[in-house]
Image (cartoon, helix red, strand yellow):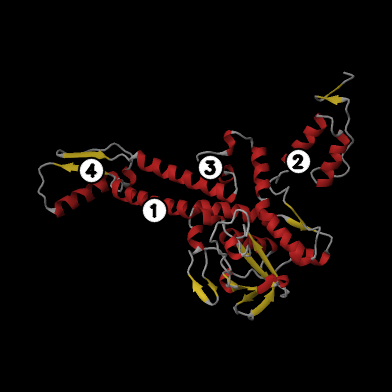
Amino acid sequence: MGLLTPRNYHRTKVTDTAYPSGSGFYWSSVGGSPIAYVNAEGALKNTNVYAVINRIASDIASAHFKTENRSALNRLEQPSRLISRFSFWQSILIQLCLSGNAYVPLPQSNFENVPPSDVQINYLPGNTGIIYTFAESNERQKMNLRDDQTLHFRLMPDPDYRYLIGRSPLDSLSDALTIADKTMNSNLKSLQNQINAAGQLKISNVTNDNLDLADARTEFEKANAGDNAGRLMVLPDGFEYKQFEMKADVFKALNENASFSADQISKAFGVPSDMLGGGSSTESQHSNSEQIKALYLSNLNTYVHPILDELKQKLNAPDLDLDIKDMLDVDDSTMVGQMNTLVSSGAMSPNQAQFMLQRSGYLPDGVPEYDNSWKGGKSNAN
């Protein structure tokens, strides 16, 4: 017993050997018993969650793998005969963000992103291994595969399951998303109930017969709608029209809730809110665009490294890497700016910078050599 172990402490003996395949967002099973989880499709109905997951998944899927292992590289760059390379890896990242786990059986020649609802994990006693049971689906037969036969990508392993099961960033947003959803529904009801009417038409000396009032409204709308919309309004005696103003506080509440939701989701997924187009406290308040991009690329390692380490181990490709540096520099402006800074500081010569720009494809081969005698469009001799 350790020095700091409380008196009368008894370690709980773990007898469970079957674990759920996800952390909170799908139907799954433990020991054959179903467990009901929140449906991840509901989370994607939130525009901020959709935006952040789509951004992460799309950016990483656009990057290409690099390794000297040609066999592994071919499988990774052509993972499926059914969908494109981009779509396959995008689906893996979407699955990873939603449930914290993504599964791919290795024995199949065609990589398949198996939903967590089709997977059950069985832990072998004595820390001797893991068995993944893939349920039968379509043309896929039921499979019992060892851990070295399965790609299991996971985020933030859960200690409740011996760190074998990942957890989704959405786990930390359950309260925030619930508040945002209820607030949005409340605000929508307020909009429907408070500002649905366009205005008020008062008519003097009229009976309270519903038919008369309906006819008066219909005739008024005909006279002031269509081609007459926006023109001078002419009212007969006894008519008075007052247009309602939309309550600004309703829209203010909507904007505040949208900003709050964007900030919380950005924080959970590690994506600067500027990359999603907003939030009440944006990175641009204290950073420039290059710093924001650098921060975003650094935070992407949260999702890149779990994928790379799993692939390195299971595909025997220790030098495997993912080229994510150029994913945001679509017009090479960042690279050109870096070359300019290096040349200005004397760390690189103009010829070296030209060589780097030619190697990247920004400059074509055969560009004339740099002539330092020309500055500002005029020769030094003149």
Against 11, residue 376 (above or below) is above
Q: Quadrant of residue 294?
A: top right
Residue count near mark 4 (Cα–Cα under 10 Å), binned few <14, some 14–19, many ≥20: few
Against 241, residue 184 (above or below) is below
Question: Would residue 30 be seen by someone viewing this image from the given angle?
Answer: yes
Amino acid at dot 4: Gln
Q: Quadrant of residue 355?
A: top right
Contact check, label 4 and label 2, Cβ < 8 Å:
no
Of labels 2 and 3, the one closer to you? 3
Could you tell whether 257 is left or right of 372 in the image? left
The residue tagged with tag 4: helix, strand or loop? Answer: strand
- Name the residue: 18% across, 42% down: 202
Q: Provide the residue designation for mark 2.
A: 335
Q: Provide the residue designation for mark 1.
A: 182
Residue count near mark 3 (Cα–Cα under 10 Å), binned few <14, some 14–19, many ≥20: some
In what quadrant of the picture does the C terminus appear? Answer: top right
Q: Name the N-terminal-most of marks 1 and 4.
A: 1
- Name the residue: 11% across, 50% down: 208
The residue tagged with tag 1: helix, strand or loop? Answer: helix
Amino acid at dot 2: Met
Q: Name the N-terminal-most of marks 2 and 1.
A: 1
Residue count near mark 2 (Cα–Cα under 10 Å), binned few <14, some 14–19, many ≥20: some
Q: Provide the residue designation for mark 3.
A: 278
The residue tagged with tag 3: helix, strand or loop? Answer: loop
Residue 321 picture location, percent across and down: 77, 55
Q: Which mark is residue 17?
A: none
Amino acid at dot 1: Lys
- Name the residue: 71% across, 54% down: 63
Q: Provide the residue designation for mark 4.
A: 200
Q: CA distance from mark 4 to mark 3?
A: 38 Å
